[in-house]
Image (cartoon, rainbow, N blue to C red):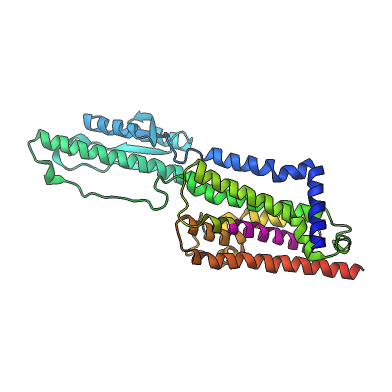
Amino acid sequence: MSAFARALSAELAHLRGCRWDLAMLTLMPAALLFAMGAMLFGGVARDLPIAVVDHDATSASRAIVRAVDASPAVRIVSVGADLPDAMTLVRREQAWAIVEIPRGVGRGVARGTVPAIHIRYQASFLSTGTQAVRGISSAVTAASTELVAAQLSAHGLPPLRVTPLTVQVTALYNAATSFEWYLLSLINPAVLHLLTACVTVMALGRELRDKSLSAWARASGGVAGAVFGKMLPYVAAMSLWGVAWLLYLTLARGWRVEGSIALIVAGQSLFYLGTACISALLVAVTRETSTGLSASAVYAGSALAFSGATLPLDGGSGFARIVSAILPLTHYLALQMGQFVGDAAASAVGPILALLAYVAIAGGGAVLLIARSARSAA
């Protein structure tokens, strides 16, 4: 405990005297979390630009155009009869989708045989493209229903004769299909994960003398206490930023956690402690700050892509599954997302044990390597 206290006191003194390192724990997380929150504050994309190609030019087609333009999800930037011109707008990223109204829509509505309305969207930008398609489809469906009903009434036919099937779609746990709720719950832990990895590498890297931590270990009086005492300020700072982010989402933005917030907070602390232990192991193995930082950037920077939260691992290669399983972010997100949707507390046992394994294996390995280096140099 004396080694832990000495290391903690020395690290806090260093942070008080080094504005740059202190900024990595205060200003940098604040700036990154603010930037992520500001980018996704709207939650749902609105007024996405689209083009309309109207080959029919009838009152029916114009009614469809008005209905599409009234949708809050999209706004029409071009209406014409030339498909190549609309395709040019898509290639220039000036429109995310094209609504093509074929000839015969007006006659088809009157006869009850409406030809298909084509929607082409920019699939290279999948999120914005699908959002635009969703808004267009809802508007076209509503307009078509109204047009058919009006035509039937005009011909003296009862609307019930062609009542369409009713389809109800219910989104679970993210009813607004908000990018803010979904993406911030993934990106912000990943950002803090990367910061934790880097700042703890820098903290231990400062103690390298002749590519060895042996002198620092001998002076500390206890390797395990010294390692964890040095890492504590960084783990505590990132855990507090994680709590602040969680409070922002729930209290300030009104999103609801169906499960246990306490479990999420505990999982965050274990997650950042495990990350710090991996950094300690990287420094102990490589004996170079630059190499440790590079390795941290590789594994922590790519962790979100392999976590299975953004891209499904079903059907993925064995390599992708193995990488996902050995990354701490995968297990933390399993705990967090499970509690977000109201899983039982027992479901968090597996992820917590996995996060504890990083502390025990990576942290224990770092302590053993540093202690052995100290004994060899004695």
Residue 252: image x %, image y %? 51, 41
Please say if 36 is above or below 210. Answer: above
Q: What residue is at 48 percent from the left and 55 percent from the top? A: 340
Classify residue 224 by image quadrant.
bottom right
Q: Position of residue 263 (x, y in %)?
A: 55, 59
Task: Please check the rendered image and state whether residue 279 is part of the magenta-colored stretch, yes or no.
Answer: yes
Q: Residue furthest left?
A: 156
Q: Quadrant of residue 128?
A: top left
Q: Can you give x and y, in whole percent of width and height, for residue 219 in the image?
A: 88, 61
Say left or right for 45 vs 145.
Answer: right
User: Quarter of the image containing the C terminus?
Assistant: bottom right
Res. 219 visible in picture? yes
In the shown orientation, is residue 234 left or right of residue 7? Answer: left
Q: Start and end of the magenta stretch?
A: 266-287
Is residue 195 visible from the viewing direction of this image? no
The answer to whether residue 255 is above or below residue 98 is below
Quarter of the rendering occupied by the N terminus = bottom right
Quick one: 3 or 172, which is closer to the camera? 3
The residue shown at (59%, 39%) is: 35
**Relative to 295, does residue 35 appear above or below in the rendering?**
above
Q: Would you say residue 353 sits in the magenta stretch?
A: no
Q: Quadrant of residue 79?
A: top left
Residue 315 location (% of width, % of height):
47, 65
Name, please, the residue furthest toward the right.
Answer: 378
Q: How many marks?
A: 0
Please name whichever residue, 328 or 14, is drawn nearer the observer in this view of the structure: 14
Task: Identify which residue is drawn at 77% across, 66% down.
Answer: 367
Q: Main secondary structure of the magenta part?
A: helix
